[in-house]
Amino acid sequence: MLHEKQINRRAFLCKSAAVAASVIGFPHVVESSALGRAGSVAPSNRIALGFIGTGGRGRFNMRAFLAEADVQVVAVCDVDASHREKARNEVGLPAEGAYNDFRDLVHRGDIDAVVISTPDHWHVPAAAAAVRAGKDVFCEKPLTLTIGEGRVLCDLVAKYGRVFQTGSQQRSDGGFQLACELVRTGRIGEMKMIKVGLPGSRSIEPQPVMPVPEGFDYDTWLGPAPWKPYTKARCHGRFRHIFDYSGGKFIDWGAHHLDIVQMALGMDGSGPVEVAGRGEFPKEGIYDTAVKYDLRLVYPNGVAVNVSTMHRGGIHFEGTEGWVFVNRGVLEAHPKSLLKEGRLVSYDSHIRNFLNCLKLRKDPIAPAEVGHRSSTVCHLGNIAMLLGRRLRWDPQKERFVDDPAADRMTTRTMRSPWRL
């Protein structure tokens, strides 16, 4: 159940909306798909969500949330009209429920929480606006574009007392949880080495400048990023290969697997103290993130993590008494008896965990601080690759040790008029 105050506010808003609809001629009927499973939970007790970013991942998230009986979708937002309309039609919203500008959506009084599935460079600006507007937030990973903006977001979430879940779904998976338990409880002995296999980005030949497609607000899509001419290979699912909008496949998958490393080592509020390695970057075209890399991270407890495109995809924890390997759908260990010693149980889904915590007003399994710290590990790796030297990091001060040049890379200038 939502808090009584929330329920009363919802009832008032619903009644007001119905009156307004009768005055201006809108139909009173709302599709059951927009309200969750029809008839299972009273509308006044459902959690009203707004979705910011309704491309492929955004609609996937929308369907996953609508599988929960206590959810309803009341608004969608996307700068691509085709994405926006597909999402609006899928949940049966009136035209007034679809927005081009997320700032209009977050200020709606009938929304409890927002789900952000935009390109990475929009995660923090959209989340910060939602938090300031009093909304709880579910935001896709990687949570941040820079280390500095992550700290700003975490401070805002704490200041406004919002419930925040980062979309690091592996944290809610039983296999990953069991692997972390085997590490934390010393079942594989003293930790010797962790190997993380991640994919590399891709390169692309130089691209022609193209006209912006009709219905695509490209200037807003760029937002705080530097202005660049439009070409199809820059936008939507391809943005991750470009530093202006993301950090490559390294941060795309690193935000998942290195998050599990942080979890297993008990370093959710900390991070490595040293990072070194090398990366291979495209020599032409608009894609500029690492296509190959090999990095070494050292944590305060002395444990070293080798992250490479050469390793088997997943996470290999090697101890003095055994090892465990985990990836999606894969859990292996030596000796095999280790897998019978842990607790492979059924956990709440990542979305269910968020919704439950929203009602209870407590932190979910991947709060803002966790998402920020896991993203930071990836940013450290990218900075080390770009500078081509060993770096020392202070995870408490969130600064590099005696390296002003590296410190300057923890933030970026945002294109006017966008500010955090």
Image (cartoon, helix red, strand yellow):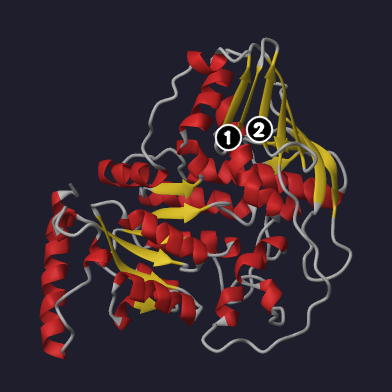
Which SS class for mark 2? strand
**Nearer-the-camera pick, 389 or 81:** 81
Identity of the residue drawn at 67% across and 78% down: 232
Name the front one of labels 1 and 2. Answer: 2
Q: Is residue 394 visible?
A: yes
Please tell me which of labels 1 and 2 falls first in the chain: 1
Question: Is residue 391 positioned above or below 5 on the image?
Answer: above
Quarter-wise, where is residue 91 in the image? bottom left
The percent coordinates of residue 106 (x first, y second) are 37, 67
The percent coordinates of residue 115 (x first, y second) are 41, 59
The residue indicated by pointer 2 is: 315
Q: Are marks 1 and 2 in contact (CB under 8 Å)?
A: yes
Kindly identify the amino acid type of the residue bearing the numbered disc 2: Ile
Identity of the residue drawn at 51% across and 78% down: 80
Question: Is residue 29 positioned above or below 341 on the image?
Answer: below
Question: Is residue 272 found left or right of 132 in the rendered image?
Answer: right
Identity of the residue drawn at 48% across and 49% down: 167
The percent coordinates of residue 387 (x first, y second) are 85, 50
**Nearer-the-camera pick, 298 or 206:** 206
Which SS class for mark 1? helix
Kindly identify the amino acid type of the residue bearing the numbered disc 1: Ile
Task: Give the CA distance from mark 1 to mark 2.
Answer: 8 Å
Question: Is residue 194 found left or right of 358 in the rendered image?
Answer: right
Q: In the image, which disc is placed on residue 260?
A: 1
Question: Is residue 96 found left or right of 397 in the rendered image?
Answer: left
The percent coordinates of residue 300 (x first, y second) are 68, 25
Q: Is residue 403 visible?
A: no
